[in-house]
Image (spheres, rainbow, N blue to C red):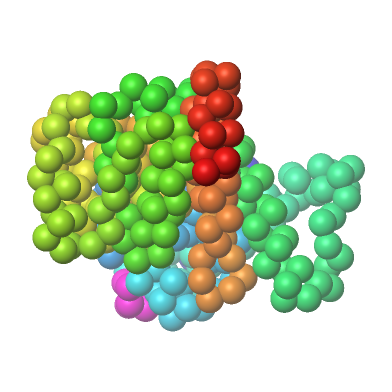
Amino acid sequence: MPFCVEGKARASAKWTAVTKTATKTPPQLKSLSDYIQERFDDFSRSQKDVARYIVDHLDEAAFLTAEELARRASTSSSTVVRFSQALGFEGYPELQQAAIEEYRNGIATSAAAQKAGGALFSFDHSELEGSLGADYANLEETARNLTREQVDGAVVALAEAQRVVVVGVDQMAFFASYLRHTLSLLDIRAEIVTSTGGESLQRLGRIDDETLVIVLSSGRAHPLLLRAMKLAVHRRANTLAISDASLSEVGEHAGLTLYYSSNSPSFARSNTALMALVQALAHGLYARDEAAHRDRIRAYKLK
């Protein structure tokens, strides 16, 4: 996705100088998202929240004010400004212009494919159509970003685990429960951790090297998720992070990671792709031994 930096006054000069310093390739070949990911380890924790949101929600971030972006990234507008300056821009407006250019370039490269397949909805769509269209795009982006090796690795880890612990808090608690339900249909026993209560902490306390710990994350990782992941790594457990942030904090510690897209025009993030991913993992497990699972599920339905 080429990123053009011509004609942007002093901010562009800074951006050009920074990209030339950071890499030996022409700056016009580097996208803003690529540069942010290269510099990610240099940012503060709050700046990393901004970085994650821009990289994974570029189509939204490109058109948000500094205050709106700060709210979406769970930080302050001053952090957004400092983040912009850390990248070599004078301020947020220059960073936003770079994001808009990358977004427009992405639209241009996919225009032919959209024309061939036909748009899902007309440009002048309702709120319902906008939400459905975003979910449709989330499914496509999730499928494009996942490799067969990643999904197969997660399925094998689930199939071979002696014990499964699924960790998810807030809205992720529902998906932790649903994943446990689908696994139970396939005769895989799983426990869930959805709070910092005594019983949940006891489940974490029983993690060992035969356990698969699955962490479900949306946005900034809850402290409990990081605690569970670090404990699992310390006890040599197998770990799987399922997150809507490609630069996820929990993903940094996980042995296996699966990314899903959660862009939404609404006030809440979309979980459509996450649900589809949970379903896909269950189907992968089912496909390993369809005959055995078919009989079990048939018996379950007859109860």
Front residue (pair 22, 258)? 258
In this rendering, would 3 be left or right of 260?
right
* Residue furthest bottom as drawn: 67
The image quadrant where one finds the N terminus is top right
Q: Is residue 175 above or below residue 61?
A: above
Front residue (pair 230, 11)? 230
> Which percent across, then down, holds residue 32?
51, 52
Q: Residue at x 36, y 59 (%)?
A: 173
> Which percent across, then down, holds residue 171?
40, 64
> Which percent across, then down, holds residue 63?
59, 71
Number of numbered discs present? 0
Q: Residues in magenta? A: 75-79
Was residue 275 drawn as part of the magenta stretch in this picture? Answer: no
> Which percent across, then down, holds residue 198?
11, 60
Q: Is residue 34 above or below residue 10?
A: above
Taken as a whole, is the magenta stretch helix, strand or loop?
helix
Front residue (pair 8, 37)? 37
Q: Residue at x 73, y 72 (%)?
A: 128
In this rendering, would 198 be left or right of 107?
left
Q: Residue at x 89, y 43 (%)?
A: 116
In this rendering, would 206 be left or right of 88?
left
| Residue 89 lies in quadrant | bottom left
Q: Is residue 98 above or below residue 213?
A: below
Q: Residue at x 44, y 80 (%)?
A: 67
Res 141 visible: yes
* Residue furthest front as drawn: 303
